[in-house]
Image (spheres, rainbow, N blue to C red):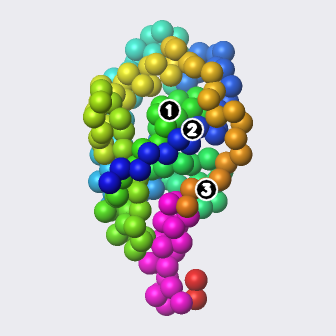
Amino acid sequence: MMIEKTETCCSCSGSQKSKSVLVEYLYLDLQTCDRCIGTDQVLDEVMSEITPVLALAGYEVDYQKIEMASEEVARQYGFLSSPTIRVNGRDICMTVSENSCGCCSDISGTDVDCRVFEFNGESFEVPPKEMLAEAVLQMIFQPAECACGGNEYRLPDNLKDFYEGKQKQQCSCGGSCC
């Protein structure tokens, strides 16, 4: 079952005037989660191919990978769903679509939904290379106005459940002290 959410980016930094590009990959897990690992690999390929072209055009590219290791980090980044790719603070996806993620459910011991990427009328748990390249370049060369309206960030219940479950899973007492 796919869940459609209408939440949009809440970390918009306004219009980008300089020729610097910040690409952030925000994820829950790169050890177990097939979705996060696969997206990481595809994004690495895309960035290795487009970064030299952007540099040739005079752009300075900063590519960062940031693990959303805790609820506090998720709140700091206004994290809505895993995995997330942002260009200059803006999510490459206009909406959040999710479905059940067995890997993250296993990590936390609770049912967890993670991002599904929509491209050309299809849904992908790991986005196609073409989709990521197109989305990143479009965010750089055709930036749209922020659609979030400055909404205050609220950690989605799905992520709250993930972090609470993960903490209980890691606790030596089986969760009774947590």
Q: Quadrant of the N terminus?
A: bottom left
Query: Residue at the spot x=64%, y=59% of the render?
Result: 72
Q: Which residue is mark 1?
A: 94
* Cβ atoms at labels 2 and 1 below 8 Å apart: yes
Residue type pointed to by label 1: Met
Q: Earlier in the sequence, mark 2 or mark 3?
A: 2
**Residue 91 sits above or below residue 107 on the image:** above
Q: Secondary structure at mark 1?
A: loop
Query: Residue at the spot x=49%, y=79% of the render?
Result: 168
**Residue 138 sits above or below residue 87 on the image:** above
Residue type pointed to by label 3: Leu
Q: Which residue is mark 3?
A: 155
Q: Main secondary structure of the magenta part?
A: helix
Q: Secondary structure at mark 2?
A: loop
Q: Earlier in the sequence, mark 1 or mark 3?
A: 1
Q: Which residue is mark 2?
A: 8
Residue 130 location (% of width, % of height): 30, 25
Q: Earlier in the sequence, mark 2 or mark 1?
A: 2
Q: Quadrant of the C terminus?
A: bottom right
The range drawn in magenta is: 158-176
Q: Is residue 31 magenta?
A: no
Query: Residue at the spot x=36%, y=24% of the render?
Result: 133
Q: Distance of mark 2 from mark 3, alpha carbons? A: 13 Å
Query: Residue at the spot x=60%, y=61% of the render?
Result: 71
Residue nearest the observer in this picture, 64 or 118: 118
Lateral position of residue 72 relative to residue 112, left or right: right
Residue 2 location (% of width, % of height): 36, 50
